[in-house]
Image (cartoon, grey):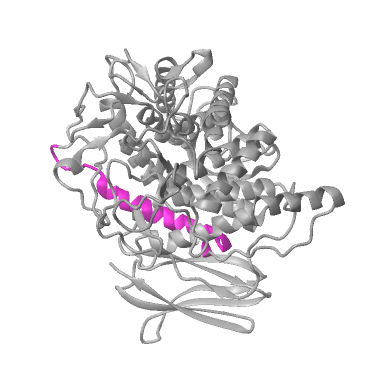
Amino acid sequence: MRISRAISSLLVLFVCGVPALRAQYAVRSPYLIHPGIAIAYVDSCAKFWLTAYDSVAGGSGGFCIGVNQTGKVYSGWGQYKDVVIQSRDAYGFTRAFMLTGNEAYLTYARRALDFMYAHDWDAAHGGWYAQNDRAGNPAQGTDPKAAFDQHYALVGITALYEATRDTLDWRWLMKGYANSDVRVWDSTASQAGYYDSASYDWSNRWGKSFNATVDAITTHVLHLYLLTGDDAYRKRLMDLKGNILNAIYPTMAPQKIGFVESFYTNWSWDNLPRGNNTRTIMGHVLKTAWVLGRMHQLFPDPASVQAAESLAQNVIQGGYDHQLGGPYKDYDRLTGAMMMYGQDTAKAWWQMEQAFTAGMTLYNITGNDEYLQVADETVDFFMKYFVDHTYGEVFSDRTRNGHEILAWGNDKGNSGKGGYHSTEFGYYVYLYGKLFVTHEPVVLHYMFEPDSTDRVLRMNPLALKEGAYRIGDVSFGGAHYADYDASARTLHLPSGVGGHMIVTYEGVTTGIRVAGSGAPAGFRLEQNYPNPFNPSTTIAYTIGAAGHVHLAVYDVLGRLVATLVDRQAGPGSYTATWNAAGSASGVYFYRLSAPGNTAVKKALLLK
């Protein structure tokens, strides 16, 4: 469907007063049929980034930026430590803990932030340095400061605070936010918004941009509101939404594709051929749609939905691969030509995430299956071609067919790529897939620091409309913890109480999707993930009828190695985990049998 067909469907719904009868899109990606397997994917990404930690004598901790395909850190430039990479890696480790419960990831998230707190803050002028050398010294202390760095410095701090409510992180979060509020925010009424750039001492500030505006919402401002409910953050969100709707979004109309991304300080713009002035990035257009969709969920506004759909359709109609799935990378907004950079057609790892999150959010708001299809096709392409199933993590770029772009190589880490988008992608595949597609509860882990005061914690991992989801259960120390308000999503912790808590969230059936997910019924055995693996892998499967289910692993000689499932089960989707710590490297086969059906697939264990 395109916009006209979407409007037609909505008119049928409105006029007739009953749901329109239409064929429902059936998702094909295993990651939307069994969203739980996204946990293993996130775990593999987080494990990869452990290799970037500088634990060698002579280093100062922190995570290096230059990492090759196998996880080896390059010498020289590779040992620099950008503030954005520290924060993004902290975010990735935190989300990996929240999905897996592996507390070791919190240790590494803390190490990344400790490096930031010790080395990246400009004590003389305020704000974050962009880059440090291996020893922690600012690479260029007099370089200009960018809103991009100031915003992304807070993404990891915000995530770790959400998972732990550690007051140390809260103090740094407030320090960074206050600096941006005073020095990065332009309070001039006619041109309000975050400046794009400033001199090192903030004596000169200039420009406005997509990054300064939209990234402020995604990195911290939205989450600060979800965590606190503070009206000051609501107001800033409204300011930023105004910048999008009144300054950025309107520039889409005269372009062949996309919108203007770089502005003068007063929000004016031009088409002069300087630098990347006429470049428009499909991931940025889609991220803006995702942001407006989430804002609408919190503060209902038809204008936000209309703009979000227009932005998404701009990419779907002009910058999306309808054959293989996923958005293309960059375009010239004046000519509509794809930017080839002297290479092949390209897709970027982080832009794939934006297609998925925008698609799932708009599907949840509108019920339009086209958005579900975009999300499904995109995650399917991403998991097949971007994920490195040998060494873990994901590649930065692929051709439209999923091949390597030879001139760009397969390095995993650089100044623009760390453990953020890859883990965030998996995090939202799990949450959105469970809540929006399979309609199953989601489970997240927290490690709350004890406090001397009585606390009521707001538990809002997602920006969804009021009443859309609630707390279903809380576990603490292996036992049920009852001191919470399910509907308000608040958790009461008395003075001195803290530790590892597991919170289950469940959707509340409201709105346009009352029944039936896009997941198909019937018998199905998925490829294990990760594969190759060491030492654990997840196997997802679906059975269409009640009966006895048996899932077992065999070696190449047909000998039984492990029985994973042997029980009665009803129709539905399931996952099983095989821990092969006691098995030798090699090829193994896993066999699923259920009433009237049998399937076998191959797994590769590499130690």
Most foreground residue, 323 or 176: 323
Residue 448 visible in image: no
Most foreground residue, 82 or 44: 82
Residue furthest to the bottom in view is 557
Horizontal and vertical percent for residue 117?
A: 31, 26
Q: Is residue 126 left or right of residue 570?
A: left
Quarter-of-image position of residue 457: top right
Position of the N terminus, as image quadrant, is bottom right
Q: Which residues are magenta?
A: 30-58
| Residue plotted at (45% across, 17% down) | 186
Most foreground residue, 439 or 386: 386
| Residue plotted at (40% across, 35% down) | 156
Q: Is residue 49 magenta?
A: yes
The image shows residue 30, relative to residue 2, as above or below, that is below
Q: Main secondary structure of the magenta part?
A: helix
Horizontal and vertical percent for residue 183?
A: 39, 16
Horizontal and vertical percent for residue 234?
A: 59, 24
Q: Is residue 430 magenta?
A: no
Horizontal and vertical percent for residue 333?
A: 45, 42
Q: Is residue 400 left or right of residue 48?
A: right
Q: Is residue 513 left or right of residue 540?
A: right
Quarter-of-image position of residue 503: top right
